[in-house]
Image (tube, helix red, strand yellow):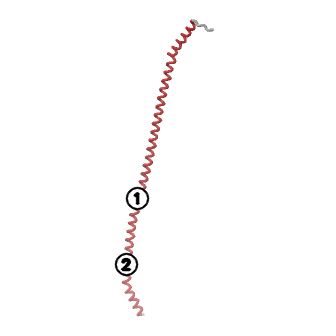
Amino acid sequence: MLDFDITLLFQLANFLIALFLLNKLLIKPVREVLAKRRRIIDDMTGEAVSFETQAEKSLADYEAALQRARQDAGAARQQGREAGTAEQMAIVGEAQKKAKGILDDARLALKKEADATLAALRGQVAAVSKRVADKLVQG
């Protein structure tokens, strides 16, 4: 059986004193260090999440700006093509007008020349006919 004598009280007192001293000198400081580490890790995790969120937002903004730039470039390219086509049509239209004018002038000049030649030939027909008739009569 167990004897409850004074040594048990001394051992209990030693245990309590040792527990108090260990708590004061070892357990409490270790807990504070662990709590401090936990706060630092939580802060770093929060910062990392914040940086990640900010990076995702920056990437989304960059991609949106890039998409807008591509759309603007496509619109500018299309506008340039349309302007070039309009200018080409204007130049071709003007060239066709000039060509038609030149062709009309050439036709008019040719008609005048043909009329002048025909009038000259009609004027000579009488003289040639008279000479042919004279030769036939003499001949």
Tell me if 20 is positioned left or right of 114 in this view. right
Label 1: which residue? 86
Quarter holding the C terminus is bottom left
> Residue at horizontal 40%, vertical 90%?
133
Q: How far apart are the alpha carbons under marks 1 and 2? A: 43 Å
- The residue beneath circle 2 is 115
Q: Secondary structure at mark 2?
A: helix
Q: Which mark is residue 113?
A: none
Q: Residue at x 39, y 70 (%)?
A: 103
Q: Position of residue 92 (x, y in %)?
A: 41, 62
Q: Nearer the viewer, residue 81 or 129?
A: 81
Query: Looking at the image, which residue is at 42% across and 56% down?
Result: 82
Q: Going 47% across and 38% down the picture, which residue do you hit?
A: 56
Please name whichever residue, 50 or 6, is drawn nearer the observer in this view of the structure. 6
Label 1 SS: helix
Compared with 9, 62 (above or below) is below
